[in-house]
Image (tube, rainbow, N blue to C red):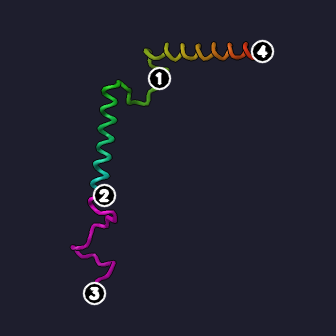
Amino acid sequence: MFSPYDNSSDSSSGNIFGWRISLIGLVIILFLAALAAYRHYTMDVPVGFDDPLEQPESRGYYQEKAERERAAADTLHQQRDN
């Protein structure tokens, strides 16, 4: 008789979704990876986990941004006090 625990060579591999769904998932994953790689190369976005404040070319940008935010906060405080 046939048992659910039969380990014969003609049994399925245990994939409950079927090969069609598995292949569709693989295509989606590959498409998203290709999209991420395309956007990385066309937009010059760094991939690493480096601290942006440690990079010399961006250090000035973040310092200027912090100064602009402090200036905006100061003007808001002055307007509120008047």
Q: Quadrant of residue 21?
A: bottom left
**Residue that carries the numbered disc 4 in the rendered image:** 81
Give the CA separation, mark 2 to mark 3: 31 Å
* Badge 3 or badge 4: first in the primary sequence: 3
Q: Residue at x 31, y 64 (%)?
A: 15
SS assignment at label 3: loop
Give the CA separation, mark 3 to mark 4: 88 Å
Foreground label between 4 and 1: 4
Would residue 81 be counted in the magenta stretch?
Answer: no
Name the amino acid, label 2. Ile
* Badge 2 or badge 3: first in the primary sequence: 3
* Badge 2 or badge 1: first in the primary sequence: 2
Give the CA separation, mark 3 to mark 1: 66 Å
Give the CA separation, mark 4 to mark 2: 63 Å
Q: Residue at x 45, y 17 (%)?
A: 58
SS assignment at label 2: helix
**Residues at marks 3 and 4 touching, judged by CB atoms closer than 8 Å:** no
Q: Residue at x 27, y 60 (%)?
A: 19
* Badge 3 or badge 1: first in the primary sequence: 3
**Residue that carries the numbered disc 3 in the rendered image:** 1
SS assignment at label 1: helix
Name the amino acid, label 4. Asp
Query: In this orientation, which residue lies closer to the viewer: 17 or 51?
Result: 17
SS assignment at label 4: helix
**Residue that carries the numbered disc 2 in the rendered image:** 21
Give the CA separation, mark 2 to mark 1: 40 Å
Considering the whole magenta stretch, tell me its main secondary structure: loop
- State which region is magenta: 1-20
**Residue that carries the numbered disc 1 in the rendered image:** 52
* Badge 4 or badge 1: first in the primary sequence: 1
Q: Residues within 10 Å of mark 1 (few under 14, many from 20)?
A: few
